[in-house]
Image: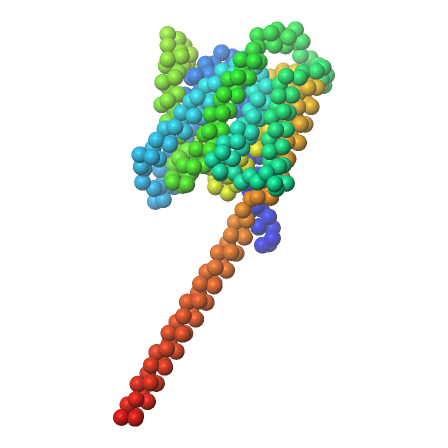
Amino acid sequence: MATASSSYDRAKPFLAVILLQFGYAGMFTITKHALDEGMSQHVLVVYRHAVATIVIAPFAIVFDRKVRPKMTLSIFFKIVLLGLLEPTIDQNLYYTGMKYTTATFTSAMCNVLPAFAFLMAWALRIEQVNIRKMHSQAKIIGTIVTVGGAMLMTLVKGTQLDLPWTRGYDQQASASALTKQDPIKGALMIATGCVCWASFIILQSITLKSYPVELSLTAWICFMGTIEGSMVAVVMERGNPSAWSVGLNYKLLAAVYSGVVCSGIGYYVQGLIMKRKGPVFVTAFSPLSMVIVAILGSFFLKEILCVGRVIGAVVIVTGLYLVLWGKSKDQPPSDSSDDKAEAIVTQTATEMQERTETVDQEFVAIDITKVRSTDESI
């Protein structure tokens, strides 16, 4: 039972981050459909974080009321910056880039995120890197391979795959949709957004050290993202009040799903994983969502899969495993090991205290004996 419990405890971060990638994959697919229906990407950012704030804030107020530290000017400034980096800048660029490309293309480009996060964590000495060690070399090579696979998937198309569920698609419609895309412009926007996303992840891990309440931090980030995103949307959609209208359709589903799953639950779970595994571990699994989106996109968005994208996906997964292998060799002990170590330290301290008390008692006994022998001689 103890072994099974410890194994499950070690597996929890992996399970959590994998489920997180499934959630992101659903967001890619649903959001792309909403944007294709004409939804404004700037308004979507506002509605997404407004929904996330409404959902997360009550839990943060109730569960963190006794453990929430005092808000300082330094912490508040970090929260404002967090709300600007990912909810506002990254997501506006990300959704705009998605409009110029496809859901699969966007998710593939997001695979540069682990590379940016690794380089930033390395520069800030958050990530352990020793060039002479094999596991550090694996992390560096894996990062390069992952980015190379994403570029391969983006730039090399190859022949189209004739999958059974894509045979009924209108090939002319697919070709006309491809002509409206601008992969270069979209790729630049998505890559710039990933730089902001990586900066957000690094800053979130730093902020959690001085403000270690994940729910409250998530609520604050979503609230700031709503305010700052609203400023951007008002400017970008001025003179277009119809852009703010949402009905019972994919536009509403995109706002609610991305707000609850990707912003609310996503930021919170991401913070929990960072405390145990670090920021690079969180980003290392992002290629998984690309594979899921490629499959969902071919089913629901009628996106055509090409041989180049499949080969790129295989290369990305290979790089991912290299990074994960390197991370596994420099991770701190699991919680169960920490508990054992803490118990040993506590037991040792208790034994030392007992020995000290015993020695003190012996000294007292010696003093009393000396006093008695002196009295008798007198």
Q: Is residue 223 above or below residue 13?
A: above
Q: Residue furthest front?
A: 132
Q: Residue at x 48, y 59 (%)?
A: 345
* x and y, in percent, of residue 14 in the image: 57, 39
Q: Is residue 11 above or below residue 171?
A: below
Q: Is residue 338 above or below residue 349?
A: above
Q: Residue at x 61, y 41 (%)?
A: 132
Q: Nearer the viewer, residue 220 or 76?
A: 76
Q: Quadrant of the N terminus?
A: bottom right
Badge count: 0
Q: Is residue 97 above or below residue 318?
A: above
Q: Residue furthest left?
A: 378
Q: Nearer the viewer, residue 115 or 207?
A: 115
On the question of residue 59 being in view, the answer is: no
On the question of residue 375 being in view, the answer is: yes
Color style of the picture: rainbow
Give left or right: position of 244 versus 94.
left
Q: Nearer the viewer, residue 44 or 245?
A: 44
Q: Residue at x 33, y 81 (%)?
A: 367
Q: Quadrant of the C terminus?
A: bottom left
Residue 162, quarter of the rendered image: top right
Residue 210, quarter of the rendered image: top left
* x and y, in percent, of residue 300 in the image: 61, 19
* x and y, in percent, of residue 161 in the image: 71, 17
